[in-house]
Image: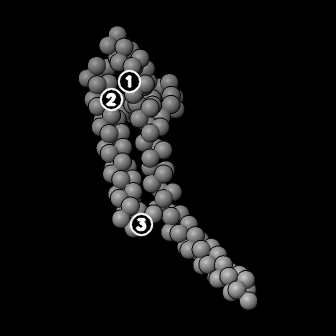
């Protein structure tokens, strides 16, 4: 893989991570806004309920009481939980790449140097 392709992959992962974070935050704040308006909860309680719902924690200390809130809650977790899993997987992949990519490259370079050195020695021995 050449350097341009690696840079494009890094940028692509960075863009996907950024987009996932932005979409996840928008989803959380929009869910909190809806619960705040529909249920009459303050914004912090609404955000708390939204986070507890999309992360599947579900403490049960808050629950929608209005019909609209209940209907919204029937559909919102499908998008929210899916987006939460996507968000966590992309962020995890980004952290993994940032943490281990350079170490893997160093290890790969060491192995390749070793292989080339021994291949050259074997070639020299065969020529004799």
Confirm or deny contact between disc 1 and disc 3 (CB under 8 A). no
How far across and how far down the image is residue 118, in percent? 68, 80
Earlier-in-chain disc, 1 versus 3:
3
Confirm or deny contact between disc 1 and disc 2 (CB under 8 A). yes
Please indicate, yes or no, whether residue 99 appears anywhere in the rendered image.
yes
Q: Residue at x 44, y 49 (%)?
A: 91
Label 1 vs label 2, nearer the camera: 1
Above or below residue 8? Residue 73 is above
Q: What SS does tag 2 mark? A: helix
Q: Residue at x 73, y 89 (%)?
A: 128
Q: Which mark is residue 76?
A: 1
Mark 3 surroundings within 10 Å by alpha-carbon count, few (fewer than 14), some (14 through 19), many (20 or more)? few
Earlier-in-chain disc, 1 versus 2:
2
Q: What SS does tag 1 mark? A: helix
Confirm or deny contact between disc 2 and disc 3 (CB under 8 A). no
Q: Which residue, as the protein is rendered here, is positioned at the far top?
A: 67
How far across and how far down the image is residue 117, in percent? 64, 82
Q: Which image quarter is the N terminus in?
A: bottom left
Q: Which residue, as the protein is rendered here, is positioned at the far front?
A: 127
Q: Residue at x 39, y 28 (%)?
A: 79
């Amino acid at each position: 893989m050449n350097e341009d392709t690696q840079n494009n992959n890094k940028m692509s992962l960075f863009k996907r991570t950024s987009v996932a974070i932005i979409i996840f935050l928008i989803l959380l704040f929009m869910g909190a806004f809806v619960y705040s308006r529909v249920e009459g909860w303050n914004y912090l309680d609404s955000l708390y309920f939204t986070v507890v719902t999309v992360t599947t924690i579900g403490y049960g200390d808050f629950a929608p009481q209005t019909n609209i809130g209940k209907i919204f809650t029937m559909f919102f977790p499908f998008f929210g939980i899916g987006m939460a899993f996507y968000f966590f997987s992309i962020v995890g992949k980004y952290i993994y790449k940032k943490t281990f990519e350079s170490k893997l490259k160093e290890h790969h370079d060491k192995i390749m140097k070793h292989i080339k050195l021994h291949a050259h020695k074997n070639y020299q021995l065969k020529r004799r």
